[in-house]
Image: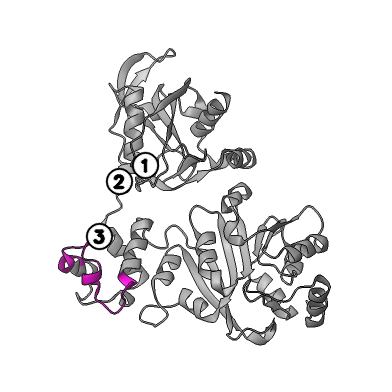
C-alpha cells in the first residue's frame, strides 16, 4: 500500500495514528510482499494476522491461503477491512489480540501467524500464540529491534535471557532483517526487526518438564549477575554434584548455559521418565465376558494383542465455567500417541473396582483429588479397544500436576468449541474419548 493511499484512507476514516494502540502503518510495498513470502503460505493454510491496520500485508496474503482471520483493535479500521476484503475466506474480528480465544485455532488443525506487533504488548502476544497446545506451524512477527534480538540471542551475549530460552526451547528463531523507521507512517523512533519462528522437531532436543524449565530459567535470570548455585539452591541443594553431571563450573551464571544445558539441568532436577509409559506390559487386568463378568486374569500385553475384553475408566473434569479439561497423550503411549483424550483415564487393574480406579487415575494422571460422579457405561467395542468403560465427571479449577511420562500437555476447552473441533477433525482424538463424549452428550 502506497504512502499516499495510506494517508488518504486514514483521512477518509478520520483516523489519526494512535501511539497508545501502537499504530505504525507499513508503506513499503516490496517489504510487505517480502514479509508475506516468509510465511511460505500454501493453498490449504489458515492465516491469522494481528493488527492488520489497512491491510498492507493482507492484500498479498489473501490470494495465497485458504482463509484468514484478521484481529484489529481499532473499530474504524476493522470496518474498513470488512469492506475491502469481502467474501467468505476473510473473517475480521474487532477485538484486542490478547482477548482472542486462541483455542479456536484447534478447529483449524494448523495455522500461521503474522503481525506488525505494537511494541507495548509484543511479549504478551508472543507468549500467547506460541504456547502449548496451539497447532501453530509458522510465525512471522515485526517487533521492536531490541526484542527481536533478544528472541534470537545466543549464550553469553547481553541480549540472551529468560525470554530467549523459554521461546527457543520449543521454537527455532531466525532474525530475518532490520526494518528502518522510515518505512512506517508515522515513523517510530526505533528500528524494527522481522523474526521467523518455526516449531522444533520432536527429536531435535531432549524432552523435559516444560513448566519446571520455565521456573528454573525465570529464577536463574531474575538476578543475572548472581551465580546459579545461589539462585537455584531450593531446586538443587547439591549443586556440586549437579554441576559435575552437567560438566560446568560451580560458579556459572545463567547467561553462560546453553539451551541444551538448561534442558539437561531441568532433567537432573526432575528426571522425565518415559519408561513409565513404555514399560507397562507387566500390568495385570481382569478379562471379562460380554456381560462384564470376570473370567480370568491376563497381562496387559496379552489383553491388547489378543483384543480381549477388559475394563477401564474415563473422567471428565470441568471447571466452574463448564469447560472440559483434555489431555494430549504422550508420544510414548502404546495406543493413540499424541491424540487428545479425556481429562484422566486408565485401566482397571485386576481385583480393583471402577469407582476406586477413577479416583486413583485423577491423582496419578493430573495430580488432584475431587469427588467423582458416575455418568454412564459404554460396552466393549472396537473404538474403546474392547474396553468396558465407566465414565465419570468431576469439578476442579486446576492447576494440575500432569504425569509427564504419559501426558504431553493439557488445556480446558469450551464444550461448544470442542463439538466443532470434533466435527472438523475427529482424527485429533483418541477413539475411546469420542465414545465417551457421545455418551456425555446423551446423558
The residue carrying pointer 3 sits among few (fewer than 14), some (14 to 19) or many (20 or more) residues within 10 Å by Cα, namely: some
Image vertical order of residue 87 relative to residue 56, above or below: above
Question: Which of the two marks, 2 or 3, is nearer to us in this view?
Answer: 3
Q: Quadrant of residue 441?
A: top right
Q: Give the number of the disc on residue 366.
A: 1
Q: Name the residue that disc number 2 marks.
A: 275
Q: Which image quarter holds the C terminus?
A: top right
**Percent coordinates x, y for residue 315 in the rendering:** 43, 32
Q: Which image quarter holds the N terminus?
A: bottom right
The question of residue 222 being in magenta is answered with: yes
Closer-to-camera residue (398/435):
398
Image vertical order of residue 290 relative to residue 283, above or below: above
Q: Quadrant of residue 396?
A: top left
Say which element carries label 2.
helix
Q: CA distance from mark 1 to mark 3?
A: 22 Å
**Percent coordinates x, y for residue 20 in the rendering:** 62, 73
Q: Is residue 209 left or right of residue 199?
A: left
**Percent coordinates x, y for residue 181 in the rendering:** 64, 85
Q: Which residues are magenta?
A: 220-242
Q: Name the residue that disc number 3 marks.
A: 268
Amino acid at each position: 500500500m502506497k504512502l499516499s493511499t495510506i494517508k488518504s484512507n486514514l483521512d477518509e476514516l478520520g483516523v489519526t495514528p494512535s501511539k497508545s494502540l501502537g499504530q505504525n502503518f507499513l508503506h513499503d510495498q516490496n517489504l510487505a510482499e517480502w514479509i508475506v513470502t516468509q510465511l511460505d503460505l500454501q493453498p490449504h493454510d489458515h492465516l491469522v494476522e494481528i493488527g492488520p491496520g489497512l491491510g498492507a500485508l493482507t492484500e498479498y496474503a489473501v490470494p495465497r491461503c485458504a482463509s484468514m482471520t484478521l484481529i484489529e483493535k481499532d473499530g474504524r479500521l476493522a470496518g474498513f477491512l470488512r469492506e475491502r476484503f469481502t467474501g467468505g475466506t476473510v473473517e475480521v474480528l474487532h477485538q484486542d489480540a490478547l482477548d482472542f480465544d486462541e483455542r479456536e485455532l484447534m478447529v483449524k488443525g494448523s495455522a500461521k501467524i503474522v503481525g506488525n506487533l505494537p511494541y507495548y504488548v509484543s511479549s504478551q502476544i508472543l507468549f500467547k500464540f506460541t504456547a502449548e497446545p496451539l497447532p501453530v506451524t509458522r510465525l512471522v512477527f515485526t517487533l521492536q529491534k531490541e526484542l527481536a534480538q533478544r528472541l534470537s540471542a545466543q549464550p553469553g551475549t547481553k541480549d540472551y535471557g529468560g525470554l530467549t530460552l523459554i521461546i527457543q526451547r520449543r521454537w527455532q528463531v531466525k532474525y530475518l532483517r532490520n526494518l528502518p523507521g522510515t518505512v512506517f507512517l508515522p515513523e517510530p523512533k526505533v528500528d524494527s526487526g522481522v523474526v521467523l519462528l518455526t516449531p522444533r522437531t520432536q527429536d531435535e532436543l531432549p524432552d523435559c518438564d516444560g513448566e519446571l524449565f520455565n521456573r528454573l530459567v525465570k529464577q536463574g535470570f531474575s538476578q543475572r549477575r548472581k551465580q546459579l548455585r545461589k539462585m537455584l539452591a531450593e531446586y538443587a541443594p547439591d549443586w556440586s554434584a549437579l554441576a559435575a553431571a552437567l560438566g560446568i563450573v560451580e560458579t556459572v551464571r545463567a547467561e553462560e548455559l546453553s539451551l541444551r544445558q538448561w534442558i539437561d539441568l531441568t532433567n537432573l532436577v526432575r528426571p522425565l521418565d518415559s519408561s513409565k509409559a513404555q514399560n507397562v506390559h507387566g500390568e495385570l487386568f481382569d478379562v471379562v465376558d460380554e456381560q462384564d463378568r470376570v473370567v480370568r486374569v491376563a497381562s496387559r500385553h496379552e489383553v491388547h494383542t489378543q483384543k480381549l475384553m477388559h475394563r477401564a475408566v474415563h473422567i471428565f473434569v470441568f471447571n466452574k465455567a463448564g469447560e472440559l479439561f483434555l489431555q494430549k497423550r504422550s508420544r510414548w503411549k502404546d495406543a493413540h500417541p499424541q491424540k487428545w483424550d479425556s481429562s484422566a483415564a486408565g485401566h482397571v487393574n485386576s481385583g480393583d473396582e471402577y469407582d476406586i480406579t477413577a479416583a486413583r487415575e485423577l491423582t496419578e494422571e493430573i495430580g488432584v483429588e475431587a469427588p467423582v460422579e458416575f455418568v454412564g457405561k459404554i460396552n466393549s467395542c472396537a473404538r474403546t479397544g474392547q474396553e468396558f468403560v465407566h465414565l465419570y465427571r468431576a469439578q476442579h479449577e486446576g492447576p494440575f500436576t500432569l504425569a509427564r511420562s504419559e501426558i504431553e500437555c493439557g488445556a480446558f476447552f469450551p464444550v461448544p468449541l470442542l463439538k466443532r473441533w470434533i466435527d472438523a477433525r475427529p482424527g485429533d482424538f483418541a477413539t475411546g474419548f469420542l465414545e465417551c463424549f457421545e455418551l456425555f452428550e446423551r446423558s
